[in-house]
Image: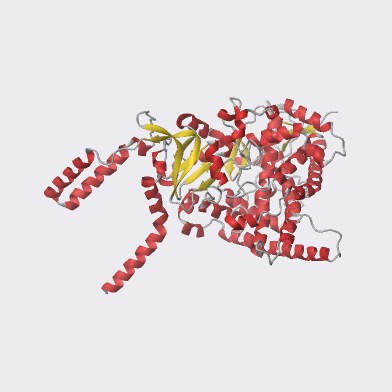
């Protein structure tokens, strides 16, 4: 019997150790991580720390506030007080991103991305040599061969918008006019492709009603985000994996909310996965630290069905590419397919060391869509928003675009200085991905990250002070009077009270010069998490000056000298990150694709259409992987960008 009890106790201990080891590691890191010596802003919640403020960083500008108080390198609190390093120091960022194989994404981030893109073998989630083998489809010459697809879809979008502007359709059931209401211009709000395909999306005319109540001014109010989402969905389908979504070709419904949705099983599958991935819950925080909880997913059956659809369609697409490439190789077709998936398939020599498995290739289909669809739609939306808020800059760019001949070459468009400055400035101010995370996972248990601006570090204190002998004397006295168990209980209670009263543990950082010293490096232990605030770095006043938050494309005529310290893939910004071909390059390998797509769409749209926004509309940002806009006065209506659109007056 005793042997059985011992066995059961052992099993129970193993199970508890497996379930709770992340929590034990987190608590241990609180005590032993070098990050405990760095300053930290106050933590409003023991459970969630500063995570709520970080999640809303685009609207509360909390990182700018923190850096002014604590410097460019400090910590903030995560789950149950766990410390995370946050730095805007350019030297530290170049070092961390340049050693990507020692600083990969944290496991819980990769797990989340894996669930979103329906596979563990995509470019967003793999690391090391596997990632290196998958960088075959994004060469500059091949991206240029995709420009005709960009032009085709941009032209289709322009024509659709012109049709709406010329012959607007009013919402089916507008609210009755009020006596005090001034005349309104006709309003259209198109449906967003991914939202409209959500099978559990509630039917509601609220969005159209809201837009109908906007103040009157020339042009038609259009949710430009939804149109751009449809257009970029078509682009990535054709250019990424040779799949036709026909999102723009769908008939425009008379009721933009309740109208017919496109009948496309792959789009529907991605809609289920994206909508689930967008939702932030407290459960998500627990799932980050306790992987067993990831088995319990809201809408789990729908997600599994959607992933099965993606795998089935992806397998069929690979078979088609193999067949097309085979026919092209024997001269039975005129040309090889030019989509990115075809490049991966044709470059995949099964006998070579860099060969990709079928599962790895299939994962790129969902990866292309996840990384190349909403990011492009976000970048284009924020660029049009910036131009709508700056009519003078929009006029300058349009004049430059109209000077181009109708048969201008691709090089003439992509290298036009005025267009390049606008795109650079927009991507600096409105990065589609506002932050990312890394974790130290190198071979050494500890490492040192160099800094150029220095970091405040709490000065070391002696291990033994008068408190230790006093505590020992009190313990021995209590032991003699009441026994060791009572003495231990009293000392534990006193210890907890002392910890609660400790300003450092409470997050009250006074930064008393007598308690702090400045170092030119920061130490990390294996497992320490680093947050890289891309957007805050792009707007750093120390680099860009006091007008860093203003949209001013002309600054790129002569960028401030300090900007060379931001060694990004897209020079002088960190929007696309950076990396090293030797120590690991996790920068955005599709950045050429994105920039070419953005420039072509702007060229086609701005030559024919003018964009503006009403003064009383306040747009804020909602961040969950990608930065999306919403109207501050109506957040319940979801992501949207209501811009006024009209034809350019000749």
Outermost residue toward the bottom in this view? 1
Depicted 564 relative to depicted 330: above or below? above
Which x, y percent locates residue 295?
Answer: 51, 60
The one nearer the camera, 42 or 453, is 453
The one nearer the camera, 6 or 266, is 6
Which x, y percent locates residue 539?
Answer: 59, 32
Which x, y percent locates residue 336?
Answer: 81, 59
Outermost residue toward the front in this view? 582
The residue at the point 19 percent across, 40 percent down is 470
Which x, y percent locates residue 195?
Answer: 66, 48
The residue at the point 22 percent across, 49 percent down is 489
- Left or right of residue 213: residue 323: right
Outermost residue toward the left in this view? 481
The one nearer the camera, 187 or 42, is 42
The residue at the point 60 percent across, 45 percent down is 579
Instruction: Identify the image quadrant of the N terminus.
Output: bottom left
Residue 564: tell me if it is visible: yes
Residue 614: tell me if it is visible: no
């Amino acid at each position: 019997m005793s042997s059985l009890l011992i066995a059961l106790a052992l099993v129970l201990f193993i199970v508890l150790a497996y379930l709770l080891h992340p929590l034990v590691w987190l608590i241990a890191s609180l005590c032993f991580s070098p990050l405990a010596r760095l300053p930290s802003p106050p933590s409003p919640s023991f459970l969630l720390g500063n995570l709520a403020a970080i999640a809303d960083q685009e609207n509360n500008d909390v990182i700018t506030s923190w850096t002014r108080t604590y410097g460019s390198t400090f910590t903030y609190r995560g789950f149950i007080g766990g410390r995370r390093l946050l730095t805007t120091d350019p030297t530290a960022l170049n070092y961390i991103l340049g050693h990507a194989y020692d600083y990969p994404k944290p496991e819980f981030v990769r797990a989340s991305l894996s669930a979103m893109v329906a596979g563990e073998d995509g470019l967003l989630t793999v690391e090391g040599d596997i990632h290196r083998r998958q960088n075959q489809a994004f060469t500059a010459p091949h991206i240029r061969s995709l420009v005709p697809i960009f032009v085709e879809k941009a032209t289709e979008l322009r024509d659709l918008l012109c049709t709406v502007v010329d012959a607007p359709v009013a919402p089916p059931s507008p609210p009755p006019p009020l006596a005090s209401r001034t005349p309104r211009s006709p309003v259209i709000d198109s449906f967003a492709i991914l939202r409209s395909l959500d099978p559990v999306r509630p039917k509601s005319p609220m969005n159209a009603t809201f837009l109908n109540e906007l103040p009157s001014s020339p042009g038609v109010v259009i949710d430009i985000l939804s149109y751009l989402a449809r257009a970029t969905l078509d682009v990535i389908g054709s250019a990424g994996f040779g799949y036709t979504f026909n999102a723009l070709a769908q008939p425009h419904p008379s009721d933009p909310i309740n109208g017919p949705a496109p009948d496309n099983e792959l789009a529907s599958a991605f809609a289920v996965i994206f909508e689930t991935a967008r939702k932030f819950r407290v459960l998500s925080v627990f799932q980050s630290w306790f992987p067993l909880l990831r088995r319990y997913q809201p809408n789990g059956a729908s997600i599994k069905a959607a992933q099965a659809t993606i795998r089935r369609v992806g397998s069929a697409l690979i078979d088609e590419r193999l067949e097309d490439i085979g026919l092209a190789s024997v001269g039975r077709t005129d040309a090889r397919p030019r989509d990115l998936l075809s490049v991966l398939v044709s470059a995949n020599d099964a006998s070579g060391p860099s060969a990709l498995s079928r599962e790895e290739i299939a994962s790129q289909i969902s990866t292309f869509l996840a990384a190349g669809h909403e990011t492009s739609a976000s970048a284009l939306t924020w660029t049009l928003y910036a131009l709508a808020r700056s009519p003078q800059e929009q006029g300058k760019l349009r004049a430059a675009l109209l000077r181009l001949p109708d048969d201008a070459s691709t090089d003439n468009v992509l290298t036009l200085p005025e267009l390049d400055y606008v795109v650079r400035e927009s991507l600096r101010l409105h990065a589609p991905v506002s932050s990312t995370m890394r974790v130290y996972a190198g071979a050494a248990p500890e490492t040192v990250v160099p800094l150029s601006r220095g970091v405040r570090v709490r000065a070391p204190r002696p291990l033994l002070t008068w408190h230790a002998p006093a505590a020992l004397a009190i313990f021995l006295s209590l032991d003699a009077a009441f026994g060791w168990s009572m003495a231990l209980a009293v000392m534990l209670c006193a210890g907890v009270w002392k910890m609660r009263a400790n300003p450092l543990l409470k997050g009250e950082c006074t930064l008393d010069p007598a308690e702090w010293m400045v170092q030119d490096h920061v130490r990390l232990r294996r497992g320490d998490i680093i947050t890289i605030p891309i957007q805050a770095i792009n707007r750093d006043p120390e680099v860009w000056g006091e007008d860093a938050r203003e949209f001013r494309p002309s600054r790129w005529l002569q960028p401030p000298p300090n900007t060379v310290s931001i060694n990004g893939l897209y020079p002088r910004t960190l929007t696309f990150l950076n990396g090293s071909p030797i120590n690991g390059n996790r920068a955005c390998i599709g950045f050429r694709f994105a920039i070419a797509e953005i420039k072509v769409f702007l060229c086609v749209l701005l030559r024919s259409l003018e964009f503006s926004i009403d003064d009383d509309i306040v747009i804020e940002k909602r961040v969950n992987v990608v930065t999306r806009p919403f109207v501050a006065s109506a957040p319940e209506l979801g992501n949207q960008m209501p811009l006024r659109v009209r034809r350019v007056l000749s």
